[in-house]
Amino acid sequence: MSDGQSMAEHPLKWQQWLTRWDEQQRGYLPHREERFEVMLDLLEATTKTREPLVVDIGCGPGSLASRVLKRLPGANVVAVDNDPVLMQLGQAAHSQSPRRIRWIDADLRSPLWTQAPGMPDQVDAVVSTTALHWLPSDRLAALYRQLAGLLRPGGIFINGDDMAFGSNQGRIAEAVHAVGAGRADLKGEVESWDDWWRAIELEPSLAAAFSQRNQRQDGQQTSHQPSSYASHREALLQAGFAEVATVWQVLEDRVLVAVR
Ligand SMILES: C[S@@+](CC[C@H](N)C(=O)[O-])C[C@H]1O[C@@H](n2cnc3c(N)ncnc32)[C@H](O)[C@@H]1O
């Protein structure tokens, strides 16, 4: 029996791991649920079909994908990521709705990720949370061109993530960082990123996924200064999106919406 099959027999345990993931993410993003709500409100308001096809890029274990399915019961989600551990956790935690989430193992840095097996030709919406900040601006521009090709005309892209202030907004950026640093956050109260990873690494059924993850991460850059909102906007307009706006913001954390 493969790990995937044995994991599917314990959905509750994997749902608890997903809840624990959400808790540690909330430690870094106290407004995470509010941000999800805004994204879902927009998705619902702009989706014209009862059965929209939505792609979640950098989906992790499917926190946003599962919220999309709850909000839009007719939707189907294509969940894209390249972390084998988070993908396997997501598949196991959502094993009771397997037909509504299709998991695609693909690297968003690749010029060919939209052609990965199982990827649809055209979708109604693309969503993403806390995932694109690591992309350098040249790769972000290439990704946005790929999204423009994937979205139907009138389709929507919704990205919730940190976006920096521009180089001509240095004093504002400095003040925002000072405000952020001075704010009481939840980091001391909930499990940290490192502790969550140390804990889940002890799960025997994830051993193969961890070894693949370690191979993939070997020598890979893992952090990047987020691109500015202005460069996201410029890259989206250049890629052929008709409208771009910020619709929610707390300091550097924004929800950006773009209409194809
Ligand atoms: C902080 S997690 C956020 C996951 C999820 N969107 C959430 O909000 O809980 C960032 C995600 O981006 C994914 N990611 C990073 N680099 C990637 C790449 N090159 N291709 C695909 N996914 C990537 C990671 O594997 C991880 O799942």
Image (cartoon, rainbow, N blue to C red):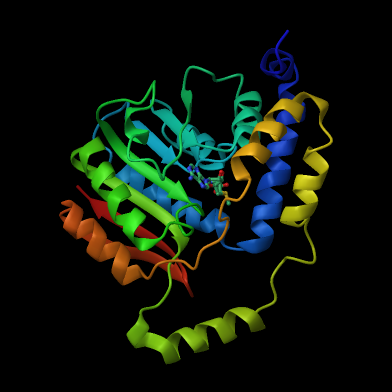
Which residue shows up at 51% across the image and 63% down it?
224
Taking 256 as reference, is 18 left or right?
Answer: right
Taking 21 as reference, is 252 left or right?
Answer: left
Taking 65 as reference, is 241 left or right?
Answer: left
Give whichever of 215, 34 is nearer the camera. 215
Q: In terms of image quadrants, where is residue 108? A: top left
Q: Residue furthest front?
A: 219
Which x, y percent locates residue 146?
27, 42
Which residue shows up at 40% across the image and 65% down it?
248
Which residue shows up at 56% across the image and 41% down it?
60
Determine if residue 46 is in view: no
Which x, y percent locates residue 93?
65, 28
Q: In terms of image quadrants, where is residue 116? A: top left
Which residue shows up at 55% across the image and 20% down it?
97
Taking 235 as reference, is 87 left or right?
Answer: right
Give whichever of 68, 222 is nearer the camera. 222
Which x, y percent locates residue 168?
33, 86
Give whichever of 64, 166 is nearer the camera. 166
Q: Residue furthest top?
A: 1
Q: Is residue 65 above or below residue 96?
A: below
Q: Is residue 231 above or below residue 15?
A: below
Q: Is residue 224 above or below residue 168?
A: above
